[in-house]
Image: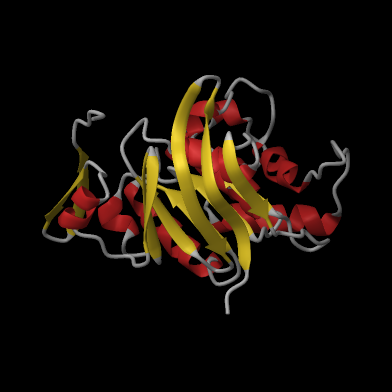
Amino acid sequence: MKEPLIEVKNASAGYGDSVILHNINITVNDNDFIGIIGPNGGGKTTLLKLILGQISPIEGSVINHIQPTKLRGAVGYLPQVSTIDRKFPITVIDVVLSGLMSSKGMRNRFSKLEKESAEAILRKTGIYDYRNKTIGELSGGQLQRAFLCRALISNPFLLILDEPNTFVDNRFEKELYNLLREINERMAIIMVSHDIGTITSYVKTIACVNRQLHYHNSNTITQEQLKVYDCPIQLITHGQVPHTVLKTHTQQ
């Protein structure tokens, strides 16, 4: 039986007087690979913040069962690249190592083993040669890889990815998804993406978020099901190359 890591129960959340999510229920278990889909403004990032503990529910509860250890962190998080200050004077290797900083605060030194682990992850994602570059010198795809390494360095129980394929070139996109499939063997993953056609080949289950949440206990989803879930996303496939198109959505 799977062990629950995070339980969101009857939770509503938002900012100030604006309620974005209404009566959300979802349980994240160990080794889950959940794809989060939905229209822009539907509350996908708000859901991630709720799970991460960055915001508190207005109603309901979020129960975190994760107990980090010396060898494993609690949650690794890859935010959207657009939220990152690229003018901050920090090198790629220091970005990755910053993922080992605990709630106790900043660390001035890291062990040889920790540095070797950071370098190994950088090699895995193909940006080892940029380890001493500042983040302002990186392309969007390289920056995305650097922060993915940061999210992975603590070997977390749960990895949360907000649009990880943004700015990533086609070659690395396939490598990225194969890497995620590999690491899902040792940790749970939540991934927000608009690319439904691709992620359904990798995720295990799907949650559609559009103010409310509809959980689909499978990695296959039809246009009819999306309509039932009030999730205004159209699935279009051309040959071997899947595409997704977001329809215009208006609240009733």
11 and 2: which is toward the camera? 11
* Viewer can see residue 78: no
What is the number of callouts on the image? 0
Relative placement, left or right, of 116 versus 201 is right
Relative placement, left or right, of 109 versus 196 is right
Report the residue at 23% width, 30% height from top. 252
Furthest residue to the left?
Answer: 239
* Viewer can see residue 252: yes
Report the residue at 47% width, 28% height from top. 19
Q: Position of residue 174 (x, y in %)?
A: 37, 58
Structure colour scheme? secondary structure
65 and 133: which is toward the camera? 65
Relative placement, left or right, of 37 versus 4 is left
Q: Position of residue 81 (x, y in %)?
A: 49, 33
Q: Position of residue 43 (x, y in %)?
A: 42, 36
Q: Is residue 179 above or below residue 229?
A: below
Furthest residue to the bottom?
Answer: 1
User: Residue 146's image quarter?
Assistant: top right
Q: Is residue 70 above or below residue 63?
A: below
Q: Is residue 153 above or below residue 90?
A: below
Report the residue at 54% width, 24% height from top. 15
Report the residue at 53% width, 54% height from top. 125
User: Residue 38's image quarter?
Assistant: top left
Q: Position of residue 160 (x, y in %)?
A: 55, 50
Q: Quadrant of the N terminus?
A: bottom right
